[in-house]
Image (cartoon, coloured by chain):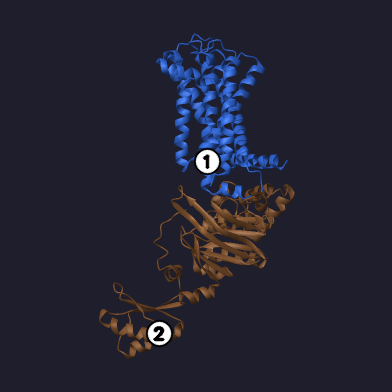
Amino acid sequence: MSAIGDIKVITQRQLRLLTRVPEVLIFSTIQPVMFVLLFRYVFGGSIDTGQPGGYVQLLMPGIFVQTVAFTLAGTASGLAEDMKKGLIDRFRSLPISQSALVVGRTLGDSLLNIVVLAVMGIAGYVVGWRPTGGLLNVALGFLFLLMFGYALSWVGVLVGLSASDARVVQNVSFIVTFPLTFLSNAFAPTTGMPRPLQYFAEWNPVSTMVAACRELFGLENQFGATAGSFPSENPLITSILYMVIIMVIFVPLSLRRYKRSAD
Amino acid sequence: MKTVIAEELVKTYDKGKVRALDNLSLDVEEGTVLGVLGPNGAGKTTTVRILSTLLRPDSGRAIVGGIDVIKNPDKVREIIGLSGQYAAVDEILTGYDNLLMFGQLYHLGKKNAVIRANELLERFNLTEAAKRPIKTYSGGMRRRLDLAASLIVKPKVLFLDEPTTGLDPRGRQEMWGVIQELVKGGVTLLLTTQYLEEADQLADEIAVIDTGKVIARGTSDALKKQVGGERLEVVVESAHIAKTMQIVAAVSGLTPTLDEGLRMISAPVSTGSKALFEVLKNLDDAGIHALDVGLKRPSLDDVFLSLTGHSAEKKEEVA
């Protein structure tokens, strides 16, 4: 089982990078914390939710999902950087399992997410977020978030290995994640959107993830689960399906891309 | 025994429009050094990438250490070391971290990986910098660490792709010393370079490649003979060009070439400083004062001019 050992070494490498450049961790937590404060205190006041405990209860699941969605960009730019520096070539010339580098990278990025989510959870608590779903459900919610981040990390592998330049990676990741996180129920009700957008928002995996987390965190108001579409009625199952679909498509595509990253 | 064999390798890019390798064949005898000499875009890196399992050729055969590279890349990876054009080490990690990581990836086990990392740091004179991140290293130190990383399991065959490109003269000298040490240890080495001098210093045999093909092959001496060894160059006033041409022709035995813009007359010479002295004396006798005079050792460009008729520098970069 040398493949597992290889993956472990690569994951360790990534964790070591965090200790060498703690700024990465600091900045990947500062941004979502800023979002929490911005939405909680700037926009939150003018959004009437009728939610007991206030807007922040609805906001936090949205911010959590947005944060793990950015794993895509993290994985992509990390791999693009490795490729540019020739590190991918070195790894590929070693007698190691050929998938170890990407698997280790996706796992390392998910471990980073644990830390980021913990910091965000504390920040949320400070500004009044109080999940009521019970310990088990809340834990399940966080597990879901990590899994979602992991699935998107595989999309990031493909983006990172396909791009010709690290700056392109930033742009592509932004173009993918930005509309997904904002054309959703994460920050505002979808009911205010024009009809076509509303459909998009309801089927958007970010919305189903947010709705699933809200459910697990004990909220009634789905914040824009409007027309009784399947995803908005069954956010948990739909989210699981989405994760499976993402993995089924992107794991083989990304691994193939890695093996041929030079052809 | 031939440790490295490449047979009629073809590799095209851009749907066949760019022919990076065009039936390239070469081989390296066990325990010797082959220098692959060529300009940017000649196919040096592509050749190394194919032989080191990173790239699949469109057609052709590649054997390293008796193993087919295309059919059995995993087996080949166990016996080769590769150090690329860019120092492929993790910039953020320290030198020690890097070597430890690669050692573990070679499945040495943590304990042996630590021992090996320290050994290599010592050997490449990096012990002092071991705990510093690579981004604080000089270009030469990075290359040495990169080379160290390719030596973790004492490879049978080592591929070095332009190991000194971009280094200052001192870094280059240091790198040459390190490579010469390695060669004494008996490794089979294939090294690519843009510098004739480097191939001359390090290689037992040189293969000159251009547009994806080997266009000449032989020892450094044989190659230089073919190129014509040193060139004598004289710059004079316009009025004296005709007479000087005669003098240089007489000494060289060959028709000199004239660069009218520079007013420079040049010709290959085989007797070095003796020819230089003779030309100066004859010019003096004819009452001609030379503005500049010198002996130039053959450069890659000269090799290319004499082998292909075109200059090495003006070629488009391909890969």
| Chain ID of residue with mark 1 | A
Where's residue A173, x and y in %?
48, 33
Same chain assignment for discs 1 and 2? no
Circles 1, 2 touching at the beta carbon (< 8 Å): no
Which class describes the residues within 10 Å of circle 2: few (<14), some (14-19), or many (20+)? few
Residue type, mark 1 in image? Leu
- Shown in blue, the chain is A
Where's residue A247, x and y in %?
59, 30
Left or right for B218, reference A171: right
Q: Which residue is mark 2?
A: B253
Where's residue B301, x and y in %?
43, 68
Secondary structure under tag 1 reads helix
Q: Which residue is mark 1?
A: A161
Of tags 1 and 2, the one toward the viewer is 2
- Is residue A75 among what the camera can see? no
Q: CA distance from mark 1 to mark 2?
A: 59 Å
- Shown in brown, the chain is B
Query: For this rendering, which residue is in front, B147 or B76?
Result: B76
Which class describes the residues within 10 Å of circle 1: few (<14), some (14-19), or many (20+)? many
In the rendered image of this protein, does residue B174 appear above or below residue A70? Answer: below
In the rendered image of this protein, does residue B255 appear above or below residue A217? Answer: below
